[in-house]
Image (cartoon, rainbow, N blue to C red):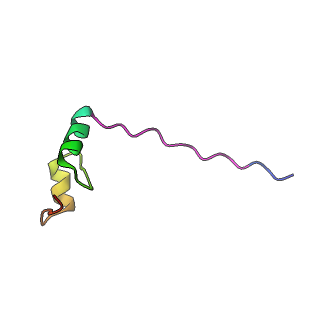
Amino acid sequence: MEPRRPKHKQAPPLEVSQKELERALKEQRAYVFPDAELERAAFPSGRDDG
């Protein structure tokens, strides 16, 4: 008999604040960052997907 394989541990659910959700829904973008600073870091030349 084969030994049982351990089950993969499930990651805890991702928590998103209400404010962040509302902003994401309003902006309708493919990627949503928690704050504008992180977004600027990821897209230094700005974004034109909206």
Residue most toward the bottom? 45
Residue at 27%, 56% in the rendered image:
30
35 on left or right of 30? left
Q: Quadrant of residue 48?
A: bottom left
Foreground: 49 or 11?
Answer: 49
Q: Position of residue 7 (x, y in %)?
A: 65, 45
Q: Quadrant of residue 26?
A: top left
Foreground: 24 or 40?
Answer: 24
The span shown in magenta is 5-17
Above or below, 48 against 11 in this view is: below
Q: Position of residue 23 (x, y in %)?
A: 19, 41
Residue at 39%, 40% in the rendered image:
14
Q: Quadrant of residue 13?
A: top left
Residue at 71%, 50% in the rendered image:
5
Residue most toward the top? 18
- Dominant secondary structure of the residues highlighted in magenta in the image: loop
Quarter placement of the C terminus: bottom left
Above or below, 38 against 16 in this view is: below
Q: Is residue 28 magenta?
A: no
